[in-house]
Image (cartoon, rainbow, N blue to C red):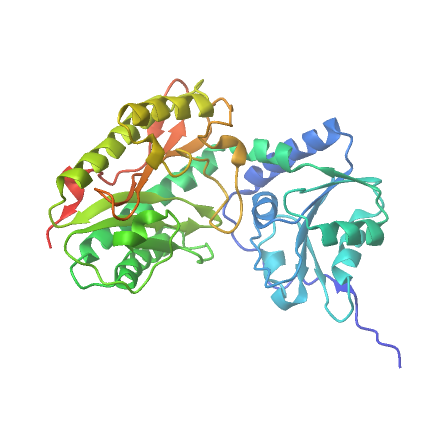
Amino acid sequence: MADTRPDFFTLENGDKATLPFAADEYAGRLARLRQMMSDRDMPAVLFTSMHNIAYYSGFLYCSFGRPYGCVVTQDRCTTISANIDAGQPWRRSFGDNVIFTDWKRDNYWRAVASVLGQPGRLGIEGDHMTLAAERTCREMLGIAELEDIAPDVMTLRMIKSAAEIALITDGARVADIGGAAVKEAIRVGAREIDVAMAGRAAMELAIAEAHPDAEYRDTWVWFQSGINTDGAHNPVTGRKLRAGDLLSLNTFPMISGYYTALERSLFLGDPDADTLRIWKANVAAHELGLSLIKPGATCSGICAEINRFFADENLLQYRSFGYGHSFGILSHYYGREAGLELREDIDTVLEPGMVVSMEPMLLVPEGEPGAGGYREHDILVVGDGHATNITGFPYGPEANIIAP
């Protein structure tokens, strides 16, 4: 007996959900994308990354080893999702949805083909599609010409709409709430994980209260102490806090795919003279950087000014990474607007609508005076003639020395 199970199908299960943004926001994003497609004579685009699929459709997928997609043509926007997710991707998609089944290999590509047809040329994300996926794409779809549209799409995402800025601003507010909870939980003998959980719980409750229609996932805290402060992305451990510890508070609320951040150095007890000197120098670099973020400034120019300051302080050799980056639909495991990072090799000019961080970090290796990692982090929205700092949590030794 022949197997009659479908390779793909549609399932409009329930009503459409309330998405992170109104319909006109998604329509505007798609209109700008379609103009770019028209300019490049590109009939269709296949997005495969979490950030671009969510940006254009509202659906943020959970892969678990399965491929996902979003096909955009001049008249349709269609997400491609795995059967394991049932109707949720349709409910969370601005446009249409097609579900592929897993009983036969490459049903994902058959589902994509059902929406694409044979466009001749197809835009893909060259920084996301694997070599294996590209090979299968060519074989299954019969498309010889694949064109990388990731850089152009990144440029489109770098300018935020008013609705995006409102969501990011509220994320910064929630990050401050998490920071206050973290600071309150700091005490000698507490584990890093105990302190981190306090901050995460406070932020998740704040997000649920302010965004009742959202999906709640991925809000996190990195709270580091002592030697664990040496890396900006070091995970939380069970290390117990001790008097005399340099501390690093890092709160990251996630609201509908958009992450924001608060990062602060703190000290448990009275800091020694070397620690205080380096901490104050990093704070001064932070304040210099805040003053430099404005429309017309270049990423590399801002970086050069802060480099010059650290060199004058004989601290440039301790710098860990670039001085800031863009914010938007991204997190620690998806998304990156690499064209808007405050580094020597990025010459992007800041424009109104961009959102960037200022986050200098110094790492003094163990065994040297003032050893540890020092970080301060604020988020700024670039406007007409100025930039607005949307982070409110205080920084520096005057605010963040904690009595043991």
Instruction: Pick the quarter of the image with the N terminus.
Output: bottom right
Q: How many marks?
A: 0
Residue occupying the far front of the picture: 367
Residue occupying the far right of the picture: 1
Residue drawn at x 24%, y 54% as measured from the top left: 181
Front residue of 381/246: it is 246
121 relative to 370 in the view: left or right: right
Residue 344, position as x, y percentages in the image: 47, 27
Classify 376 as above or below 344.
below
398 relative to 57 in the view: left or right: left
Front residue of 402/345: it is 345
Q: Is residue 74 visible?
A: no
343 relative to 169 in the view: left or right: right
Residue 124, position as x, y percentages in the image: 71, 42
Front residue of 333/285: it is 285
Residue drawn at x 36%, y 48% as measured from the top left: 231
Quarter of the image holding residue 75?
Answer: top right
Q: Is residue 46 visible?
A: yes
Residue drawn at x 41%, y 37% as measured from the top left: 321
Residue occupying the far bottom of the picture: 1
Residue 83, position as x, y percentages in the image: 67, 66
Front residue of 219/114: it is 219
Quarter of the image holding residue 46?
Answer: top right
